[in-house]
Amino acid sequence: MPTVAPGDCTGVIVAPAELCMTILVAYAPNPEGRAALDKGLEIAGRRGERLLVVNAVSGDKTDDPAFADAGEVEAVEKRLAASGLAAEFKGFVRGRSAVDEIIELTETQDITLVIVGLRKRSPIGKLILGSVSRDILLSVPCPVLAVKATH
């Protein structure tokens, strides 16, 4: 039976005990998204897991501040390549919310951890509904790690 090196989950059929696990980073092109990416790279490297970086916006909202443009995608892909990890960037712009895209991925792939970035909010801001990070935390079937950007 072939074995898998830590983080090498490509094209290998493995026994159930050797299944490749994946860490998902919910990415946005802002300090919080970059903090989530940094933490994802760190943990995936330490645990020998695959890293999936996801940027998702609803519909064709390429003017959404959460949308990663071509330059941002290229920068993230360069970081992933330089990390030496089994890593992939996926961008979704197709009428579904970021939360729905991430929920589907956690339900269809072997995701062990979702990492999201958080921004500092006022006490009133914490009460406002609609937080993507909060909705991910409450909806996905696996652990979620929330990280803050250092300013």
Image (cartoon, rainbow, N blue to C red):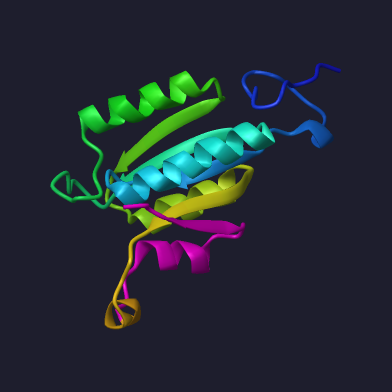
- Farthest residue to the front: give it: 151
Residue 144 shows up from this direction: yes
Look at 51% across and 35% down and name the residue there.
41
Extent of the magenta region: 128-151
Q: Is residue 12 magenta?
A: no
Look at 34% across and 77% down and name the residue there.
126
Look at 59% across and 40% down and name the residue there.
43
Left or right: residue 72 versus residue 147 is left
In the rendered image, the quadrant that contains the N terminus is: top right
* Residue 11 versus residue 106 in the image, above or below: above
Q: Is residue 136 magenta?
A: yes
Q: Position of residue 141 (x, y in %)?
A: 60, 60
Q: Which sits in the foreground, 109 or 124?
A: 124
The part of the image, by quadrant, that contains residue 70 is top left
Q: Position of residue 84 (x, y in %)?
A: 54, 20
- Farthest residue to the left: give it: 63
